[in-house]
């Protein structure tokens, strides 16, 4: 897995984690296929029918309605997801899990179905992989069968009828309360331990973190229209104080934390990636370092796993594979740390970014919008990112909190193979609200910069390739906005010359898309269209006054120095050759095939010193960080960021 002296280790695509070990892990790689055949749309036409279902279920099972609503919000934000299962086989607004049924359905659907790669190959089902017996599954993956036994409703009803699904969730909460020896109290404060148990967690820290999140929702209240058009509201109870001592009587295990680097507000366990030698003087699966002493940590990279929890954790413990710093579990937000922040994980496909970043994987699949990122996952991840931001001085903005899809190819040849996760269905707007840094307008209208900010739920650009090459993806909210070569939806899409292919609307084609929170310099305006400078050209997107997809922003921009017709763009910020000491091979500073023509402007994310982390041996005595005099600016160049030499450009205010 090691690279040459250029030190760009090969990073296998996380969209192809076919080595995931264990029957459950392997079979669940097929769950994205289920998006092709959702059970049914949410029934009923009344806009408050789901709210009524919560009231009915709460009364029937003697669970406070506010507790039921808050648990459901954390599970699904009250969304229905067209009846399709999540990455862990969870269904409906209560995210009742039935992984055995989901895996069996995936196996059946995989027969004769192309996979989401869109390359014509078949979905790979290992011949030994079969839907496991219910007894072989952990409790968190089989809450739906238990709900069926408690309610007398069929498993099919619980999977396909939102009202039945809510009733199943209420029955599970009531059963957990009784099993703990607690009364079916009307006071939400008396349900703390039952809520923790509802998560399916078998350890105290995860159950407590989950319950704390539920009670945070109870205190703040929520209101939203779901993906099925249902208006649901939960009134705030700001003075609510739960009986947290209940959880001590729940007889749950303690996590092996083993000196993990996590905030106290999340559940975090240690699953360390190995630092080991193998083969012919090769080693894996990360590098030892002493960050931030030797080199600042400037970025956090958000990934999705394209695999399930158990399989992915097996992979990161393989010294011949790659590594990342943390993984966040979908069902309950449990975090596993694999690589210390001082060390360098191999996760981004760009050695320069690896050396300056922390990588966080999230259990999920980018091409399946209904194998969703749960609210528990979003909240747990946001707490971790806030913690890392405080520890290492990382700004909470989209210039430093990157998606893997924003990481540039380090060289021209690597551009087509760069990753596209977490994809267009990751809700950056909601994520930054949880980070406490919501995106907003920061300049007067008609300013020279914009922040991309569509309404996630109503912004539903068409995509293909979620289930098979060229096949339409189901309509779904998205954080991304499409770009055209003119102010006309019939105009050609913007082309990325680095990809060596014509642009498409495939879910993995980033050539003509901008993402929530990204900032660009305005190039032109025409009615309800806005043009930005993007990949060296003028790119147009729809920005109607009644439903804006961008807001005015302020900041710094760069433009080529006077007298230059264009300047090059780089995929890594390496030092000048004079900076390298004896014994450290000089790394070439080769531009990408992109340029910035005179007169164009691009938003600056940060000033970045030219640095190179020389770590190519198992023993660390030769490891060294080379720091040069050359200064670079990180810019938002296309969908991905890029770097320009400060000596080539002029820095300006962007208003």
Image: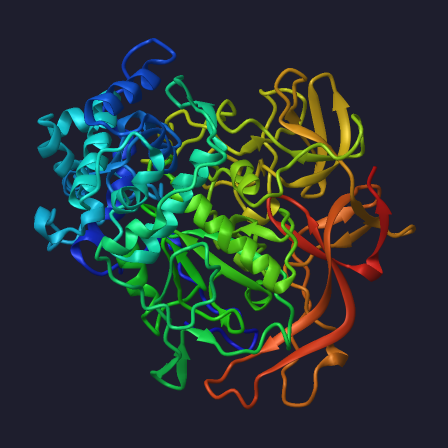
Residue beneath the point at 14% across and 43% down: 100
| Residue extending farthest top | 45
Number of numbered callouts drawn:
0
Which quadrant of the figure has residue 153? top left
Picture colour scheme: rainbow
- For residue 462, above or below residue 253: above
- For residue 144, above or below residue 55: below
Q: In the image, is 444 to the left or to the right of 386?
A: right
* Near-viewer residue (298 or 196): 196
Residue beneath the point at 82% across and 41% down: 654
* Near-viewer residue (378 or 183): 183
The quadrant in which the N terminus is found is: bottom left
Residue beneath the point at 65% across and 50% down: 399
The quadrant in which the C terminus is found is: top right
Q: Is residue 549 visible?
A: yes
Expressed as whole percent of the image width and height from the top left, the position of residue 213 reads 42, 43
Residue beneath the point at 39% across and 17% down: 230
Expressed as whole percent of the image width and height from the top left, the position of residue 273 reads 37, 71
- For residue 290, above or below residue 268: below
Which quadrant of the figure has residue 536? top right
Q: Is residue 308 visible?
A: no
Expressed as whole percent of the image width and height from the top left, the position of residue 179 reads 16, 44
| Residue extending farthest right | 563
Expressed as whole percent of the image width and height from the top left, the position of residue 426 reads 47, 40
Q: In the image, is 18 to the left or to the right of 337?
A: left
């Amino acid at each position: 897995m090691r690279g040459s002296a250029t030190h760009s280790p090969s990073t296998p695509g996380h969209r192809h984690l076919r080595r995931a070990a264990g029957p459950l892990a392997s079979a669940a790689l097929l769950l994205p296929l289920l998006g092709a055949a959702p059970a049914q749309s949410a029934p009923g036409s009344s806009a408050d029918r789901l709210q009524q279902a919560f009231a009915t279920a709460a009364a029937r099972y003697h669970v406070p309605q506010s507790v039921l609503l808050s648990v459901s919000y954390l599970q699904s934000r009250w969304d229905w997801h067209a009846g399709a299962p999540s990455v862990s086989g969870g269904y409906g607004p209560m995210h009742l899990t039935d992984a055995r049924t989901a895996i069996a359905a995936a196996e059946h659907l995989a027969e004769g179905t192309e996979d989401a790669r869109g390359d014509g190959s078949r979905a790979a089902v290992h011949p030994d992989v079969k839907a496991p017996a219910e007894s072989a599954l952990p409790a968190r993956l089989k809450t739906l069968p238990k709900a069926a036994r408690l309610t007398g409703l069929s498993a099919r009803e619980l999977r396909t009828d939102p009202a039945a699904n809510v009733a199943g969730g209420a029955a599970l909460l009531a059963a957990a309360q009784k099993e703990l020896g607690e009364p079916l109290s009307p006071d939400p404060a008396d349900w703390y331990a039952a809520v923790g148990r509802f998560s399916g967690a078998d350890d105290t820290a995860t159950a407590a973190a989950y319950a704390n999140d539920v009670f945070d929702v109870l205190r703040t209240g929520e209101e939203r229209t779901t993906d099925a058009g249902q208006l649901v509201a939960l009134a705030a109870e700001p003075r609510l104080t739960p009986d947290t001592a209940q959880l001590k009587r729940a007889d749950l295990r303690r996590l092996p934390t083993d000196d993990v680097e996590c905030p106290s507000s999340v559940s975090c366990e240690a699953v360390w990636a190995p630092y080991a030698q193998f083969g012919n003087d090769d080693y894996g699966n990360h590098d030892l370092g002493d960050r931030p002493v030797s080199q600042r940590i400037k970025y956090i990279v958000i990934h999705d796993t394209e695999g399930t929890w158990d399989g992915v954790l097996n992979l990161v413990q393989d010294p011949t594979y790659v590594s990342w710093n943390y993984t966040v579990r979908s069902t309950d937000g449990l975090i596993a740390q694999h690589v210390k922040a001082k060390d360098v994980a191999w996760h981004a496909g760009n050695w320069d970014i690896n050396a300056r970043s922390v990588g966080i994987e999230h259990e999920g699949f980018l091409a399946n919008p209904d194998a969703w990122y749960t609210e528990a996952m979003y909240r747990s991840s946001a707490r971790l990112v806030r913690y890392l931001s405080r520890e290492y001085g990382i700004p909470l903005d989209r210039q430093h909190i990157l998606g893997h899809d924003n990481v540039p190819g380090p060289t021209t040849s690597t551009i087509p193979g760069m990753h596209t996760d977490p994809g267009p269905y990751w809700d950056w707007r909601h994520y930054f609200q949880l980070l406490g840094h919501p995106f907003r307008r920061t300049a007067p209208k008609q300013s020279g910069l914009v922040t991309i900010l569509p309404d996630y739920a109503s912004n539903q650009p068409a995509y293909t390739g979620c289930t098979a090459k060229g096949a339409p993806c189901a309509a779904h909210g998205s954080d991304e906005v499409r770009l055209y070569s003119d102010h006309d939806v019939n105009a050609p899409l913007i082309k990325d010359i680095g990809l060596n292919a014509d642009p498409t609307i495939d879910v993995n084609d980033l050539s003509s898309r901008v993402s929530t929170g990204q900032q660009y310099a305005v190039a032109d305006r025409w009615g309800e269209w806005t043009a930005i400078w993007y990949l060296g050209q003028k790119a147009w997107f729809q920005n109607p006054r009644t439903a804006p997809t961008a807001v005015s922003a302020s900041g710094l921009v760069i433009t080529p120095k006077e007298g230059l017709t264009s300047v090059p763009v780089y995929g890594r910020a390496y030092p000048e050759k004079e900076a390298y000491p004896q014994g450290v091979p000089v790394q070439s500073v080769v531009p990408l095939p992109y340029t910035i023509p005179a007169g164009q402007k691009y938003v600056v994310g940060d000033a970045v010193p030219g640095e190179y982390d020389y770590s190519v041996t198992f023993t660390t005595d030769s490891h060294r960080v080379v720091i040069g005099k050359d200064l670079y600016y990180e810019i938002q160049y296309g969908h991905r960021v890029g770097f320009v030499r400060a000596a080539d450009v002029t820095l300006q205010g962007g208003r």
